[in-house]
Image: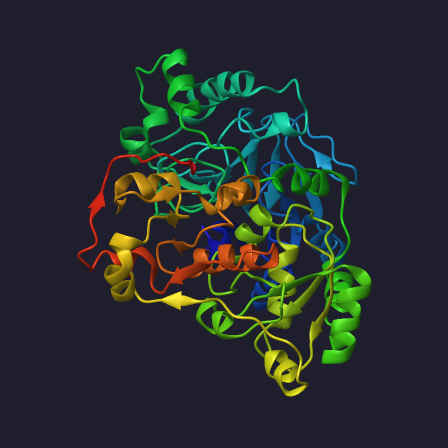
Amino acid sequence: MKIEQIYTGCIAHAAYYLESKGEAAIFDPLREVQPYIARAEKDHAKIKYVFETHFHADFVSGHLDLAKKTGAEIVYGPTAKPGFDAIVAEDNQIFKVGDYSVKVIHTPGHTLESTCYLLMDENGKEHGITTGDTLFIGDVGRPDLAQHVIAELTQDKLASLLFDSLRNRIMPLSDDLIVYPNHGAGSACGKNMSKETTDTLGHQKKVNYALRADMTREEFMHDLLEGLTPPPGYFPKNVLMNIQGYESLDDVLKRGLTALDPEAFEMTANESGALVLDVRDPEIFAKAFIPNSINIGLNGNFAQWVGALIPDIRQQILLVTEDGKEEEAITRLSRVGYDGSIGFLKGGFSAWLNAGKATDQVKRISAKELESVYPTQPIIIDIRNTGEFKSEHIDGAINIPLDYMNDHLAEFPKDKPFILHCAGGYRSMIAASILKSRGWENFTDVEGGFKAIAETQIPKTDYVCPSTLK
């Protein structure tokens, strides 16, 4: 069977391309649809269907633009209520893609409309199943997202539905089926996904905690719900965009690719109240940047951190990028619904410097320098996530995870100096830029983060220290 996974690592997302006899289908496409169109053109195929497994929360799907550009029909599973033309399929309905068959299997639980698609080859043999966020490799989809859009869809109700969907619709299927999930490790749609992005269903039945054959409903719900952290704030907004529709990416790019010289950039920032988002690497940003700009580097989990830390999805944004990276930045912002880019700094940061404009910087020290001042430096703030912190951290350090930094700004002292670090420097520079933009000056960032600190003699521990300043 001709099926290809198209994986985008920065948001841990997997779309799928299916082709037979000149007809193609795309499952759960990203916002930028040209790569899917180009893939079909390579096979001289026409995209017939865009299959959506559910209304996604962690990204804005490309279903509308793809349908508009290709004439493909959008397909959802039972109970979906899209605000645009689409086929709302019946359970067990079969769609033909060339000689292949795609069977609808309604699997509510992650969301009410969640649906898997069973893939059968030209001989009717069941080959694989695209599982969306119902079944991951090593995990299953979290059931607490829909309640942020529809209050009565509580996590307990959906967890119970997911138990039934897995046992009645997925687990009875053949062990040799290949599982094609929508996400891999790093996605916030599950708790503990594997780094592997496909597997056989039979192997998952053996190793996936949620597919244990003798598991009771109560045990399943307990294990599934235990340890869930609050979802990123942009998730419900992405769901609504996917349900109601959105602006074409072509229009978003056209607006965002407005080149502004330093004078026009500064004037636009002052008049519009736009956020200045600097997407250069943290090591470069630290040395000099536009005052009050926020650093979230493109060479990391860019879109996820934008979604976690920029509260308003409609926020107007002015970009500072390396030359030639403007379109990539706008595209990656749009993947999580941030369509408010209104221009970029023409000539990059060097143009700002050459224009004699004001700059700021972040003070940094090496791990060795930290080692020399550690006994006399009482406050060290570790912004890694709770799991990283529990594993090992500097003795006496305070944990304020970057994900929830905006809600805990008061815990960063303004009346005494402190040291800031993450694992390698990417996240701590995001935090440093946010602190700088809010008026903090009395802190220092550790170059290389905990990876560098681990090589020093600074005392470390693996028990949980207090999470707030006293």
Q: Can residue 182 be seen in this view?
A: no
* Nearer to the camera, 230 or 158: 230
* Nearer to the camera, 184 or 430: 430
x, y percent for residue 35: 59, 63
Q: Can residue 299 be seen in this view?
A: yes
x, y percent for residue 195: 35, 48
Q: Judge whether 137 appears above or below 454 on screen.
A: above
Can you say which quadrant of the picture contains the C terminus?
top left
Is residue 355 toward the left or the right of residue 375 in the image? Answer: right
Q: Residue at x 58, y 27 (%)?
A: 92
Q: Residue at x 27, y 30 (%)?
A: 206
Is residue 431 toward the left or the right of residue 349 in the image? Answer: left
x, y percent for residue 433: 54, 60
State the image quarter where residue 153 is shown.
Answer: top right
Q: Judge whether 296 appears above or below 193 on screen.
A: below
* Nearer to the camera, 259 or 89: 259
Which residue extends farthest right?
A: 271
x, y percent for residue 360: 57, 71
Q: Judge whether 226 appears above or below 362 on screen.
A: above
